[in-house]
Image (cartoon, rainbow, N blue to C red):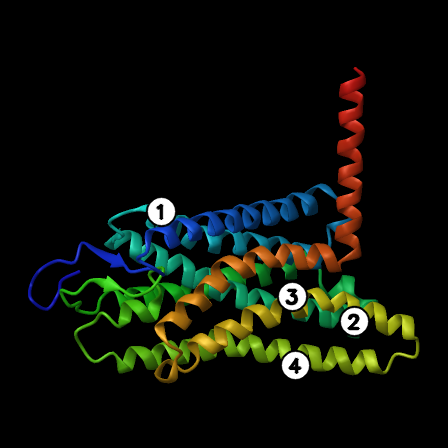
């Protein structure tokens, strides 16, 4: 990428969270522990769904994709963040920065669309249970999952291409924990108002459209639940949607707060903390939320642990 003075930008400096060495070491230990929990939790969820035939349903098919997106999103940011916490020179090459921006933006978009797809699945399960199997068949589930991945990737490709074609100043410091879209755009030596508008429009299309679909689905779900005569039926229906609704609040809430209004965005420190929450905490919490609130997942865990204990006992006796 060529800068305005004719030089080439070969890399950027990520300022990160702190310049204090002791603070950086403490953050490294904390973030490493959270990243390990994130990877293990999401990988175990995927393996559990694959191994237990009772979980071979549309809901858990989409949960598998959500776990893959979460662990991939965390991996696109956290390893580089950990390396920079211990490094003296916090430089990220141009191509690595572009790749990080593309994958993080794509995976974030994929998750938004995927959560809307999961809301539709819950809507059919609660509002039209007798036709659930006929509607949510394997072909439709596959097409919905592919649509999530494709839409998020195309959106990210467009924005990444535009951001890295802007003329950059010789000042190459990115005041963020990663190559985040708004932080990169701020480095440009030209008026970026049109880029900010494009980011806002994209956010409306890829974030708010799925959000309103989720909202519409839950309005229909709650309406159907309130019409149920059985208190037990209402309790089960609410419980079925509880895990997904919790994840929706976490993911959409932070993203809407960050991106919908770039001109009135929070401070740089707040942006960093929000990004950390989304890159580290949310992917770590998602498998916990589904494991702790879902009877089928807890039952599958118990079955798997029982099989593992039995196998261990046989090996010890043998």
The reply, left or right, for residue 159 in relation to residue 233 is left
Circle 3 Cα neighbour tier, 10 Å, few/some/many (<14 / 14–19 / ≥20): many
The reply, left or right, for residue 226 in relation to residue 249 is right
Residue 30 spot, x, y in % from top left: 49, 51
Residue 263 spot, x, y in % from top left: 35, 84
Question: Quick one: quadrant of the C terminus?
Answer: top right
Residue 204 spot, x, y in % from top left: 46, 80
Q: Is residue 33 above or below residue 293?
A: above
Quarter of the rendering containing residue 273: bottom left
Q: Rounded to the nearest whole Å, what is the CA distance between mark 1 and mark 3?
A: 35 Å
Q: Nearer the viewer, mark 2 or mark 4?
A: 2
Q: Secondary structure at mark 1?
A: helix
Q: Which residue is mark 2?
A: 238
Q: Residue at x 77, y 27 (%)?
A: 311
Q: Which residue is mark 3?
A: 118
Q: Rounded to the nearest whole Å, what is the CA distance between mark 1 and mark 4?
A: 42 Å
Q: Which residue is mark 4?
A: 216
The reply, left or right, for residue 261 in relation to residue 42 is left
- Residue 186 visible here: yes
Marks 1 and 4, the one that precedes in the sequence: 1
Q: Is residue 178 above or below residue 28?
A: below
Marks 2 and 1, the one that precedes in the sequence: 1
Residue 236 spot, x, y in % from top left: 84, 67
Q: Residue at x 30, y 46 (%)?
A: 87
Q: Nearer the viewer, mark 2 or mark 3?
A: 2
Circle 4 Cα neighbour tier, 10 Å, few/some/many (<14 / 14–19 / ≥20): some
Q: Which residue is mark 1?
A: 83
Please tell me how many numbered marks the rendered image carries. Answer: 4
Q: Residue at x 75, y 77 (%)?
A: 221
Q: Rounded to the nearest whole Å, what is the CA distance between mark 2 and mark 4?
A: 16 Å
Q: Rounded to the nearest whole Å, what is the CA distance between mark 3 and mark 4?
A: 13 Å
């Amino acid at each position: 990428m060529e800068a305005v003075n004719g030089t080439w930008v070969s890399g950027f400096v990520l300022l990160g969270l702190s310049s204090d060495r002791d603070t950086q070491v403490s953050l490294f230990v904390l973030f490493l522990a959270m990243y390990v929990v994130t990877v293990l939790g999401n990988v175990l969820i995927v393996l559990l769904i694959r191994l237990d035939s009772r979980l071979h349903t549309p809901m858990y098919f989409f949960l598998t994709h959500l776990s893959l997106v979460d662990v991939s999103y965390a991996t696109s940011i956290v390893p580089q963040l950990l390396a920079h916490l211990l490094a003296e020179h916090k430089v990220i090459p141009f191509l690595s920065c572009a790749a990080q921006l593309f994958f993080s933006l794509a995976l974030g978009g994929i998750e938004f669309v995927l959560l809307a797809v999961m809301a539709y699945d819950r809507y059919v399960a609660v509002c039209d249970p007798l036709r659930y199997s006929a509607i949510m068949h394997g072909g439709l589930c596959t097409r919905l999952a592919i649509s999530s991945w494709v839409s998020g990737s195309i959106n990210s490709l467009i924005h990444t291409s535009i951001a890295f074609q802007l003329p950059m100043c010789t000042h190459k410091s990115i005041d963020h924990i990663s190559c985040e879209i708004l932080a990169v755009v701020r480095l440009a030596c030209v008026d970026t108002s049109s880029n900010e508008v494009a980011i806002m429009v994209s956010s409306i299309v890829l974030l708010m459209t799925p959000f309103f679909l989720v909202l519409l689905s839950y309005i229909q779900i709650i309406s159907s639940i309130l019409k149920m005569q059985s208190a037990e039926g209402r309790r089960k229906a609410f419980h079925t949607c509880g895990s997904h609704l919790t994840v929706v609040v976490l993911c959409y809430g932070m993203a809407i707060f960050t991106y919908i209004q770039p001109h009135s965005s929070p401070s740089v420190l707040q942006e960093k903390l929000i990004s950390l929450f989304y890159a580290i905490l949310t992917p770590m919490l998602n498998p916990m939320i589904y494991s702790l609130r879902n009877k089928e997942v807890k039952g599958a865990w118990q079955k798997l642990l029982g099989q593992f204990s039995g196998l261990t006992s046989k090996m010890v006796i043998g």
